[in-house]
Amino acid sequence: MKKIQMVDLKGQYEEIKQEVTASIQEVLETTAFINGPKVHQFQKNLEQYLGVKHVIPCANGTDALQIAMMGLGLKPGDEVITADFTFAATVEVIALLQLTPVLVDVNEDDFNISIEAIKKAITPKTKAIVPVHLFGQCANMEAIMELASAHNLYVIEDNAQAIGANYAYKNGEKVKAGTIGHVGATSFFPSKNLGCYGDGGAIFTNDDALAHIIRGIVNHGMYERYHHDVVGVNSRLDSIQAAVLDAKLPHLDAYNKARQEAARKYTKAFEGIDKISTPKLSNNCKTICENCDCHVFHQYTLRVKGTDRDALVKHLNEKGIPCGVYYPIPLHLQKAYADSRYAETDFVVTNQLVKDVISLPMHTELDDEQIEFITSTIINFING
Ligand SMILES: *Cc1c(COP(=O)(O)O)cnc(C)c1O
């Protein structure tokens, strides 16, 4: 059996080596390392893939979130609601811009931001909601957009984990994750579903005026050379990373299918095991997606009940099976983001999830023998 990896970047690279090398070679030959034609080409191809009017590439996913908030003109003291159960980058940029983060609880079934919790957290100072499409599946965007329109709030989608996922509306219409809110932000960190070979990110919007503002912000607030109209940042996707991404984009749907296939096999193997709860599909997926393309399984995350999760992690590691705990500490308990306004009763679900969750190896190169070994090792441990 091949050595099991949490993410197999090498195996994936071997399959597309020629395309990637040729694409990088073009950049080397033209020496257009910054804002070269490859960046523009990738931007256009991604716009077409997502069905969104504007993609603005930038240096990483954290910058993408920050720049989106800057573009919307959010001001110090504005309250921004986001999930307690996510990667810290989401709340970090809110705090960095001196906005006020308001962390709220998530749903037990899909790990995404709770609509009821958002409703309770809205105040006259609330200016934006940042749903995170955690582990590869969209938050309930239909409900979030309704709330936003009723309260005049911006919606910034953190799409770092769900590129290529579809969101299914009640009426059956489907759109790509990250293109529903006023603005979307994504990351091309190597282990993301569409990853480059370094850092990268992008911002999406259908709003022409906002796209124009953001294009200036990523480039030192310049709209005309050496005229700095607003305070900006230096955040660029470099041409070599764009070359890698442009070579990989045509494979994204196949990569996501491979993840879904691995997820389907995991779930089947765990059927009937009471102490394991497998990932649930949400948002109309069950009813209208045949071969569900709504969840792109950035992570395949189980909840274990009546089992010592940390002992399971240790056991798997001893057997040569890597696994991850995303995330072990709720953001509201992190020193940087603690706030006396929070009560533990506000985070009942998150506080439980951090004890229960375990993410299994998930990438495009998992084979049946590996999946069999991983699932049987877990089941044997749980059955003691
Ligand atoms: C990866 C990630 C980010 C940050 O992306 P970087 O490119 O690493 O800056 C933001 N939010 C979430 C949910 C992520 O998973």
Image (cartoon, rainbow, N blue to C red):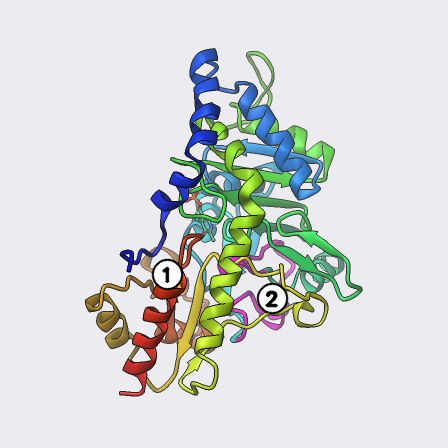
Label 2, residues with CA under 10 Å away: few <14, some 14-19, many ≥20 = many
Tag of residue 118:
2
Residue marked by disc 1? 361
The residue positioned 48% from the left and 18% from the top of the image is 26
Which residue is more in the foreground, 374 or 175? 374
Which amino acid, mark 1?
Pro
Residue 172, visible in the rendered structure: yes
Left or right: residue 245 versus residue 374 is: right
Q: The N terminus is located in which quarter? A: bottom left
Q: Measuring from the top left, give residue 57's x and y in whole percent.
A: 55, 32
Question: What amino acid type is highlighted by mark number 2?
Answer: Ile
Q: Which residues are magenta?
A: 109-137
Question: Of 28 and 143, which appears nearest the observer?
Answer: 28
Question: x and y percent of residue 41 in the render?
Answer: 60, 26
Count neighbours of disc 1 (C-alpha within 10 A) and say few if under 14, some if 14 to 19, many if 20 or more.
many
Label 1 sits on a secondary structure element that is loop
